[in-house]
Image (cartoon, rainbow, N blue to C red):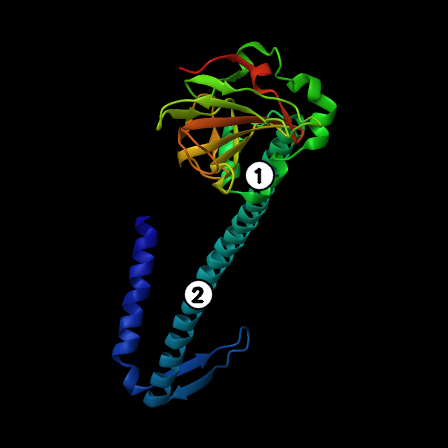
Amino acid sequence: MRVHGRHVGGVIGKLRVVFRHLGRGFSFIVAPHDTGTTVTFNLPGRLATLLAILVVVFIAGLAFVGVTYTKLALLAFETGRLKAENRDLRLRSRKIDRLEQEIVRIEQLRREIEAWAGVASRETLVRAEAEPALMARVWPRRYTYALLGAHYALKGAGLHGMIQPAAGWVSRRFTKQADEGPGHRGIDIAASQGTPVRSALDGVVKAARWDDIYGNLIEIEHNDSLSTIYGHNEKILVKEGEYVTRGQIIGAVGNTGRSTAPHLHFEVLNNGKPDDPEAYMVFRSE
């Protein structure tokens, strides 16, 4: 290391001498081997200075090119690595998009299966209130209940039967239409004005509006074959499309429409035809 250092120092010393006397000019002596003759080239000071500058510029240029090339090579390598990462991220993003689409498709299929089987969950029904397209898939499915009607029959259904929708006494019972008269499509429950009216079963409010005969009318669809009607209400406390549960207060006993005294007119429609409500009720509401 010391020998090498002295050698480098000697070269630098000689170069210093050369640059110190550069302005005086230089002579280059060429002595071919085994000829005994020499050839001398004299360089004026200015030409020697220009030559020295060119040599320095050339060396500096080589150094600059080398550094620049190294930087470009490193940049190209980094660019290639980033392109590979970007390509990998795009592939992962496509996979995530496909998975999200598959989740949406499975969720939609689950809802449709629930609707076909008639076992739509409350969550599905609540979401269906804000999604008309989903409501159309959930309600109706009449052909489903045509096949599974026995499974959804409510007569003698124990705790799954209807409750009496208002506390009171039955002042008029159901009678079928006959030749001598139109009959009575439901039952009338006499009660004080404002007595709570409750949903007889879980279901979706199909209608909540004014009717010239029933006054403030509420109709609840419990499945694709069964619905109930509540007439002459003093007020309506639910809106169309709302999901209600058995025993939930939906209105109040009133005297609206064609009515002579406060009472609740209660109907059961089975496939659109009136049926005796008392055959469906298993206990009375409080």
Element class at badge 2: helix
Q: Position of residue 89 (x, y in %)?
A: 53, 47
Q: Is residue 210 above or below residue 180?
A: below
Q: Position of residue 236 (x, y in %)?
A: 41, 36
Q: Amino acid at mark 1?
A: Met
Element class at badge 1: helix
Residue sitting at x 53%, y 43%: 131
Residue sitting at x 30%, y 66%: 12
Q: Is residue 217 above or below residue 284?
A: below
Give whichever of discs 1 and 2 has the lower sequence position.
Answer: 2
Q: Quadrant of residue 250?
A: top left
Q: Position of residue 137 (x, y in %)?
A: 63, 38
Residue bearing mark 2:
68
Q: Is residue 163 above or below residue 234?
A: above
Residue sitting at x 43%, y 33%: 233
Residue in front for this viewpoint, 124 or 199 = 199
